[in-house]
Image (cartoon, helix red, strand yellow):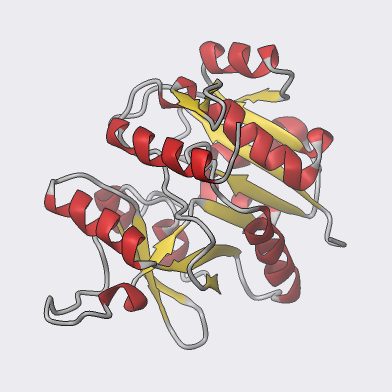
Amino acid sequence: MSEDFAILIPARYASVRYPGKPLALLRGADGTARSLIQRSWDAARAIAGTERVWVATDDARIADAVRDFGGQVVMTPSSCRNGTERCAAALEVLGDIAPIVVNLQGDAPLTPGFVVADLVAALAADPNAAMTTPAVRCSASLYRHLVTDQAAGRVGGTTVVFGRDHRALYFSKRVIPHIPESRDDAHTHVHLHLGVYAYRPSALAAYVAAPPAPLEELEGLEQLRFLDMGQTIRMVAFDPLPWDCIELNNPQDVPAIEAILRGRGLD
């Protein structure tokens, strides 16, 4: 792709739902166990090349693990409240690395490379957008995963609703929009938000200059601060992907992700 971009992978150890998550092991098709952060690094490196990818963390255990498998690390403050703030802090250390920065969150190793390419292209084409991020129409199986987790009191992923102009209206850890149970096409109306963002450095600087938004704090979703600021989040919509891009949010997600790795023949 022609656009110039770099990838940052924010990673923290102290996850509330899954402490130590970046170092959780995931077994591939041949039984090889690699940490979540290494699988995220491998996915990013396949998109941007080794020299354009950094893991941004505040934890020595994660930093050591990344260096052990040959990855690049940028240390960031422990005061960062979310991945977007951590990306902004990383840029303060790294400087002007690219006109577009992609935040590939470290719990989404199943994200296809073409999703990142489309985000970067969409942001480059829209000077009015603060950021771009993907909305994936749910398959029937992915929708079942989301509603099953919701019924059990777990967060299985984030969903998003957006207007006809593809401007984001709202993101939630609940399954939105509400759809009557009588409908058998419910999954076609629900879009999973993947944890990938493309921003310009100026948008990141504006983000960290603003205080956290009330809805951001309630939902625990960093992107809601952009909406509270009146910024445009441009959604890039995708039909159901060739595989379910389940994020590692809970220990219960490990078997589902490993099954997809096996199904795709990924070691």
141 relative position to 247: left or right: left
User: Which is more toward the observer, 267 or 220?
Assistant: 267
Q: Quadrant of the N terminus?
A: bottom right
Q: Is residue 26 above or below residue 111?
A: above
Tell me what residue is drawn at x 40 percent, y 20 percent: 20
Q: Is residue 125 above or below residue 244?
A: below
**Residue 141 location, x and y as percent?**
33, 60
Q: Is residue 51 above or below residue 170?
A: above
Tell me what residue is drawn at x 51 percent, y 73 percent: 239
User: Which is more toward the observer, 57 or 139?
Assistant: 139
Q: Quadrant of the C terminus?
A: top right
Can residue 89 be seen in the rendering of this structure? Answer: no
Tell me what residue is drawn at x 30 percent, y 35 percent: 250
**Residue 128 location, x and y as percent?**
65, 76
User: Which is more toward the observer, 127 or 205?
Assistant: 127
Can residue 252 be seen in the rendering of this structure? Answer: yes
Q: Residue furthest bottom?
A: 164
Q: How many marks?
A: 0
220 relative position to 109: left or right: left
Q: Is residue 33 above or below residue 41?
A: above
Q: Residue furthest right?
A: 2
Tell me what residue is drawn at x 62 percent, y 71 percent: 129
Q: Quadrant of residue 64?
A: top right
**Residue 110 location, x and y as percent?**
54, 46
